[in-house]
Amino acid sequence: MQAAEAMHLSARGYTRILRVARTIADLGGAETVGRIHVAEALSYRRQPPRA
């Protein structure tokens, strides 16, 4: 996943994003996880403080 590389996600972080995306897809009634679900999950991730 390009976003995982761009955001420097660890394997644990990547798995957590996929888990949140699956939950978002479930709440929306989707049978599969789409790009929009992953994008929304990434948007909920806390950003590090900018110096």
Image (cartoon, rainbow, N blue to C red):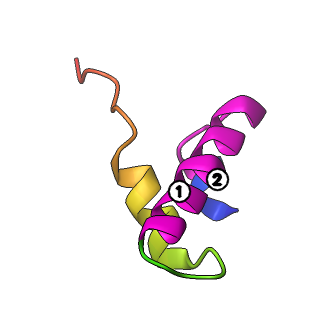
- Locate residue 3 relative to residue 11 in the image: left or right: left
Residue 14 on image: x %, y %: 67, 43
Q: Give the SS element for disc 1.
A: helix
Residue 31 sits above or below residue 41 on the image: below
SS class, disc 2: helix
Q: Quadrant of residue 50?
A: top left
Question: How many numbered discs, if any?
Answer: 2
- Asked if the magenta segment contains residue 10, the reply would be yes
Q: Is 48 located above or below residue 35 in the figure? A: above
How dense is the environment of label 1, judged by Cα within 10 Å: few (below 14), some, or many (20 and up)? some
Residue at image mark 2: 18
- The residue drawn where x is 63% and y is 48% is 19
Which range is magenta?
6-27
Amino acid bearing label 1: Thr
Q: Does 22 appear above or below 30? A: above
Coordinates of residue 10 in the picture (x, y in percent): 70, 32
Residue depth check, mark 1 versus mark 2: number of the one nearer the observer: 1
**CA neighbours of label 2 inside 10 A, class few (<14), some (14 to 19), many (20+):** some
Marks 1 & 2, CB-CB < 8 Å contact: no
